[in-house]
Image: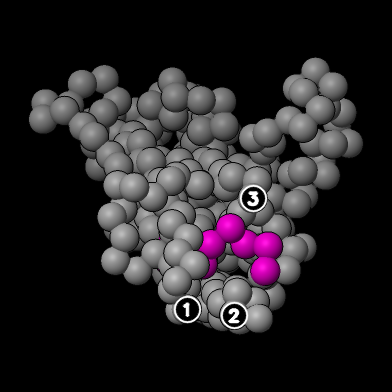
Amino acid sequence: MTPITHRPAAELPGDPAYLRFVYHHAHPADPYDDEDTLEQWHVSVLAPLDDEDDEEGSGDGQDPDLAPVIGRVRLYRLRDYTDGDRWSAADAESGDLEVIASTVLRGVKSGQSGYCKAFERQIESPVGDLLILDRVHLDKQWRGFGLGPVVAAEAIRRLSPGCCAVATYPAMGEYSKGRDETTETDRRRAKKKIAALWESIGFERFREGVWLLDTAQQTPIDLHQQHRGHLKALSHAYRTARRS
């Protein structure tokens, strides 16, 4: 699947090959409340500092503490085999997480545990934790180059080991017209656009608006490699434009 780009590489603020990812998760030594059941992960995307004297691009050897944050990814790991109630932990965090938990878990209202039958039919090996892709954000000057799926795929690759699947619930994260002025047509259009991006990295439609990526399948791995290829091509085009 070819990444969707709307802007030429010459308009990039910097060389995308030098983007850096920083992962952050903090937890207490003695878990309390839902700390042992639901982990929140924050991924910061750092931009290269432009260097006009560097013919090969920018960012190599930079001090990462000086690089600006131009993107963020928020993910949750819903852990299996804990004493906590996974649905309650998700419900206490946000409405979107509650929708996902209610859709993939078995008998959340009856106290049963485990994944539901539909989930077990769709996922090849439905045993283990569930990674939830909650939000992906890029600053406006970095949008339009097909980097959203690149960023999401890289974050998933680092955080999905030990997870049987990744879930997401496409929803509007920004309101260009303001929340009150946004129409239902605007919402449907935005969800369709977001869903297309997630499909490009291996998510498949599940039910109730939830999408799943099966970590045991080859397709997400192949798509991830395609997005890395897109990143290299974008970087090459950017460097060529700088030299011209």
Q: Earlier in the sequence, mark 3 or mark 1?
A: 1
**In the picture, residue 40 is in which quadrant?**
top left
What's under tag 1, amino acid-wise? Glu
Q: Earlier in the sequence, mark 3 or mark 2?
A: 3
* Residue at x 84%, y 36% (from the top left corner): 186
> How far apart, in angstroms, are the residues tagged by discs 2 and 1?
7 Å
Is residue 237 among what the camera can see? no
Asked which secondary structure carries label 1, the reply is loop
> How far apart, in angstroms, are the residues tagged by discs 3 and 2?
21 Å
Start-end of magenta stretch: 10-19
Give the residue pinned by disc 2: 243
Q: Point out the frontmost of discs 3 and 2.
A: 2
Would you say the residues marked 2 and 1 are in contact, meaning their CB atoms lie under 8 Å apart?
Answer: yes
Q: Is residue 211 left or right of residue 74?
A: right
Q: Is residue 46 left or right of residue 234?
A: left
Q: Earlier in the sequence, mark 2 or mark 1?
A: 1
Colouring convention used in this rendered image of the protein: one colour
Give how far across and how far down residue 180 sits, in percent: 80, 18
* Residue at x 44%, y 59% (from the top left corner): 48
> How far apart, in angstroms, are the residues tagged by discs 3 and 1?
22 Å
Asked which secondary structure carries label 2, the reply is helix
What's under tag 2, amino acid-wise? Arg
Give how far across and how far down residue 196 sits, in percent: 71, 58
Residue extending farthest left: 29
Give the residue pinned by disc 1: 55
Q: Is residue 160 left or right of residue 238?
A: left
Indicate which disc residue 141 carries. Answer: 3
Please tell me which residue lies in front, 52 or 12: 52
Would you say the residues marked 3 and 1 are in contact, meaning their CB atoms lie under 8 Å apart?
Answer: no
